Amino acid sequence: MNMSAPPTLRPVTIPFSEIKDRTANLSLKIEEGFGPNGLGIISVSEVPGYSSLRQNLLHLSPRLACLPEETRKKLEDPDSRYNFGWSHGKEKLESGKADMLKGSFYANPVLDIPTTEESLIKRYPSYCGSNIWPNDSLPELEHAFKALGQLILDVGLMVAYHCDQYVRKGSGRSKIEELEHTLARSRCQKGRLLYYFPVDSSKCNGKDESMSSWCGWHTDHGSLTGLTCAMFIKNGFEVSCPDSAAGLYIRTRNGDIVRVIYGKEEIAYQIGETTEILSQGYLCATPHCVRAPKGESTFGIERSTFALFMQPDWDEKLNFPEEVHIHRELIASNHALTFGEYSELLLDNYEIILSSRDQPVYAKLMGKVPPNSGERKSCGIRRKCLLMVKQQKTRFYILGRCVYMLLYWEDHDSD
Ligand SMILES: O=C(O)CCC(=O)C(=O)O
Ligand SMILES: [Fe+2]
């Protein structure tokens, strides 16, 4: 058995001066990064002002995580299924256990109150809710979060413009939804400040060889995810990670697993599920996970990073084309859903999908890896009941089809 470690690769890097140029033809670079032989991730370098905005925000996550428990509790928002404000222990690991390894702070970096319409807030709570800022306990967070989120969004829209050029030329399809405009008119941008708690002395020499020991395999369900290079911290000081195997892993479209590294000064962008849907499968969502560091020297190491999920508006219609197989177990091809409906459906079903590991659904997902962690959440008894009803309906439908076929054959025989 070949036990060699996956290779470490750098993504294609495009300088800011090129990505902002709408007359530049970057199709070859987009192809190299996001095309069939690419890693599914690219990075943008030399973005003015980026470095200090990254530093400012990433230093705040340990401070947020060590606020008193009752202060953090006030920053939680169960109504949005913890998709705004502080979230810890609400998401599930691949094992099905509550994820206590990391805490997240979610906010829309562009709009504090995306809508005041009650019916929308009820229907799409994970996007239509309002931001919650720790104005008394960590007042710097709001500005630092919004400034970095807005910059990653602005550069991401430039990446989206060049993706559109590439898709239009390459696919020969003129009716493809434009990513840039879809994202520019969206009220659904979501930033996630991630804090990975210090590596525990009892675990750092443990047997967990898994690549996804810090964050499970998934594809993000937005369109494009902007990612900062993570910061490792020990006792309040930035350190370099002592384990060279730790960090972000990606499964390429060829099925290879690679560890991906990029510079602190670069913003990385990877493809999410709705880009695959909107481009009718021309660009594909990038499966990824995060591996925790191991070994004596990693004890006490924390990790701070930021992801911006750039996603369509909750009202934006997604047509699920024949050639795209994303969440086919939940959504039939040629079906149309709004992005808001799509997200809530995935949130409703995530726990069920995870708990069905020995069933074809899970196997299918593992072929294409489990859904987004960004917004995977627990679901209540009501939803479990609904899913059981759906499963029963499917069984009755299949039973009905079998009876029909038997009867048909009998008729056929008697002819
Ligand atoms: O921690 C990371 O580097 C990636 C996090 C991630 O994939 C996510 O939040 O969806
Ligand atoms: Fe992700």
Image (cartoon, grey):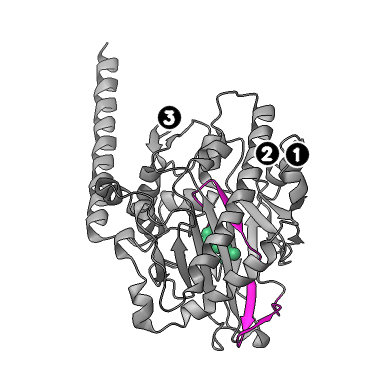
The answer to which quarter of the image holds residue 203 is bottom right
Instruction: Identify the residue at image location x=65%, y=44%.
Output: 158
Residue 98 placement (x, y as % from top left): 40, 71
The one of 4 and 341 positioned closer to us in this rendering = 341
What SS does tag 3 mark?
loop
Say left or right for 395 vs 165.
left
Residue placed under numbered mark 3 in the picture: 334
| Labels 1 and 2 touching (C-beta < 8 A) | yes
Is residue 100 left or right of 344 when viewed as pictured?
Answer: right
Q: Residue at x 54, y 36 (%)?
A: 181
User: Which residues are the magenta region?
Assistant: 217-243
Residue 54 percent location from the top left of the image: 63, 66
Which residue is the site of mark 1?
26
- Residue on which disc 2 sits: 162
Q: Amino acid at mark 1?
A: Leu
Q: Secondary structure at mark 2?
A: helix
- Judged by depth in the image, the label closer to the viewer, 1 or 3, is 1
Image coords of residue 342 (percent x, y): 39, 44
For the residues labelled 2 and 3, the Cα–Cα distance comes to 27 Å
* Label 3 CB-ligand 2 distance < 8 A: no
